[in-house]
Image (cartoon, rainbow, N blue to C red):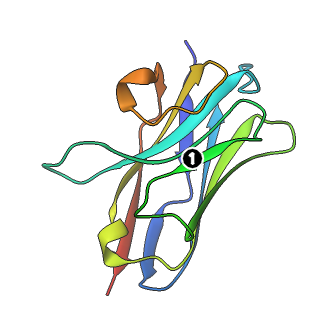
Amino acid sequence: QVQLVESGGGLVQAGGSLRLSCAASGRTFLSDYAMGWFRQDPGKEREFVAAINWSGGVTSYADSVKGRFAISRGNAKNTVFLQMNSLKPEDTAVYYCAARLGGGTYTVSREYDLWGQGTQVTVSS
């Protein structure tokens, strides 16, 4: 069973930056997978943040993060990053990494098959 592992969350002041990472456990390689980042606040629905296709050549962003966040793949395409700049208190949430086989970018959570356990991002004002 493939497992995704996120890291890089933490507490940061408004205007600061964080970089989240997502990798697959064991010998699984993510090079054939489309990847996405979602976030969720308690009591709210999981929200799309960013997505990237298998090659890294196509990306998609939620309007709320466009221009501030950047999704990318590592050189071996086995790790996915979410660079978050100019963070705002409303970015506070648990951030989840997701993966699925496929050639596009996917912005709906039910389109993904694999999920990480989440990493907490807290932005203080």
- Residue 61 percent across, percent down from the top left: 52, 52
Where is residue 122? Give x, y as percent.
Answer: 36, 69
What is the quadrant of the C terminus in the image? bottom left
Instruction: Name the image quarter holding residue 96.
Output: top left
Please tell me whether residue 21 is drawn above or below residue 69 in the rendered image: above
Residue at 65% over, 51% down: 81
Q: Residue furthest top?
A: 1
Closer to us: 91 or 53: 53
Please name the residue that numbered disc 1 is placed on: 60
- Residue found at x 32% / y 76%: 89
Residue 49 seen by the camera: yes
Instruction: Say how many tags the image has.
Output: 1
Q: Position of residue 5 (x, y in %)?
A: 55, 38
Q: Is residue 97 above or below residue 63?
A: above
Position of residue 73 in the picture relative to residue 22 (left or right): right
Query: What amino acid is at disc 1?
Result: Ser
**Residue at 52% in and 82% down:** 16
Inspect this view and state whether residue 25 appears: no
Q: Residue at x 67, y 22 (%)?
A: 103
* Figure quadrant of the N terminus: top right
Element assignment for label 1: strand
Q: Image height check: is 88 above or below 52?
A: below
List x then y, in percent, for residue 93. Answer: 32, 58
